[in-house]
Image: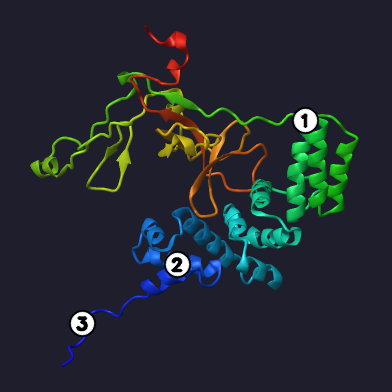
């Protein structure tokens, strides 16, 4: 006698795990399998234990697969698509920083030039920086080859060592697409003037030093007379010990107190963000792991080369950037101050032996 099946039909989890374990299909099939398993509730670590695909590899092929999907149906040739279908996930992964409309041209360019993933990483950065310009520099076009050539042209102009300069010029000539770009780079063979690179400004960091720097925020209930119900309905607010952030359980909002510094008082539309220190511009290699508070004035959207700005990334996430020239992307606000939390002992301060009390 058979009993009716009450369970839902079995998923294809086992089949997907077997596919990954045997590495059946292309890397795109593996990416789809990893993404499906993760959406089904499996963690990257669990997938690794079942298949041998390390979490970092899963992330790479899933992101590369998303890049691949964004270039299909575009201007990429069938030969290039076939090439990247079989190999090159590491190269496509590097193109994640580019806007979707720029990826197709970049993929075709990379395929025609026969570049490997290490070279593609530098190419992607050059294309990203070039995209921030409101218009191509004089003599250069918006072709990917000219964009990369411009990057090498800029580096060569800033280099005084003749051997390094010659190597950069050769790289620029290799990628130059237009005659104007080639002419501009060839001029560097006779013009040995060194143009100093404009340094990025210092981040406006400030460390809270004393308790008096951290004011207390008290919830405002309203104006007298008030009812008992209003008093009892006020939700408790517990300040966060890091910056004194106050969160309310009744509404999806939080408030943070800041000292009455001039830069804070003059802000027209300030908003605060919590950011890991090593995710700040120019701090990605830092070993400092503390959380800092970034104050952004959303009203200040006019570019200047001495400030950092918040812009939208291609994935819709916020990015902090400095631009040495006026960018062709909307500026969402200027970073006016970055506050580090108060510490009883500042390790950076005591790195000098003479600053340590005996």
**In the rendering, which numbered label is found on residue 6?**
3
Compared across the picture, whether 201 is left or right of 164 comes to left
Q: Is residue 107 left or right of residue 177?
A: left
- The residue under the point 78% across, 40% down is 168
Front one among 301 and 2: 2
Q: Disc 1 and disc 2: Cα gap in Å?
A: 54 Å
Disc 3, SS: loop
Q: Looking at this view, name the residue that lies furthest to the right.
A: 190
Q: Which residue is mark 2?
A: 21
Q: Horizontal and vertical percent for residue 47?
A: 39, 61
Give the residue displayed 56% in from the left and 67% down from the top: 69
Asked whether the beta carbons under mark 3 and mark 1 sit within 8 Å of each other, the answer is no
Residues under labels 3 and 2: Cα distance? 31 Å
- Compared to 19, does 194 lie above or below? above
Q: Is residue 291 left or right of residue 308?
A: left
- Report whether residue 77 is seen: no
Considering only order in the chain, which callout, 2 or 3, is on the residue closer to the N terminus?
Answer: 3
**Residue 335 location in percent, x, y?**
50, 35
Identify the mark nearer the N-term, 1 or 2: 2
Asked if residue 206 is positioned above or below residue 55 in the image, the reply reads: above
Q: Residues within 10 Å of mark 1 (few under 14, many from 20)?
A: few
Foreground: disc 3 or disc 1: 3
Q: Which residue is at the front of the view, 10 or 244?
A: 10
Quadrant location of the C terminus in the rendered image:
top left
């Amino acid at each position: 006698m058979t009993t009716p099946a009450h369970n839902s039909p079995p998923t294809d989890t086992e089949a997907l795990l077997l596919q990954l374990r045997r590495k059946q299909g292309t890397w795109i099939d593996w990416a789809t399998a990893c993404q499906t398993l993760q959406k089904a509730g499996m963690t990257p670590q669990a997938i690794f234990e079942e298949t041998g695909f390390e979490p970092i590899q899963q992330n790479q092929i899933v992101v590369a697969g998303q890049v691949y999907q964004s270039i299909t149906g575009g201007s990429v040739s069938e030969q290039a698509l076939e090439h990247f279908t079989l190999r090159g996930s590491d190269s496509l992964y590097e193109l994640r920083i580019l806007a979707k409309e720029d990826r197709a041209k970049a993929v075709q360019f990379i395929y025609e030039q026969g570049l490997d993933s290490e070279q593609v990483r530098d190419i992607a950065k050059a294309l990203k920086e070039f995209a921030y310009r409101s218009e191509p520099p004089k003599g250069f076009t918006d072709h990917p080859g000219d964009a990369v050539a411009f990057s090498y042209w800029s580096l060569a102009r800033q280099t005084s060592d003749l051997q390094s300069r010659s190597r950069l010029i050769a790289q620029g000539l290799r990628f130059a697409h237009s005659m104007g770009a080639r002419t501009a780079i060839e001029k560097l063979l006779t013009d040995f003037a060194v143009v100093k690179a404009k340094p990025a400004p210092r981040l406006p960091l400030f460390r809270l030093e004393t308790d008096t720097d951290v004011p207390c925020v008290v919830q405002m209930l309203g104006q007298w007379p008030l009812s008992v119900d209003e008093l009892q309905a006020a939700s408790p607010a517990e300040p966060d010990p890091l910056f004194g952030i106050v969160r309310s359980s009744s509404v999806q909002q939080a408030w943070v107190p800041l000292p009455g510094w001039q830069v804070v008082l003059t802000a027209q539309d300030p908003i605060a963000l919590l950011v890991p220190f090593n995710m700040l511009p120019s701090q990605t290699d830092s070993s400092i792991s503390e959380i800092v508070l970034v104050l952004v004035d959303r009203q200040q959207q006019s570019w200047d080369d001495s400030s950092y700005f918040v812009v939208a990334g291609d994935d819709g996430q916020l990015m902090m950037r400095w631009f040495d020239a006026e960018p062709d992307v909307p500026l969402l606000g200027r970073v006016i101050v970055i506050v580090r939390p108060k510490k009883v002992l500042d390790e950076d301060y005591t790195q000098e032996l003479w600053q340590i009390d005996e």
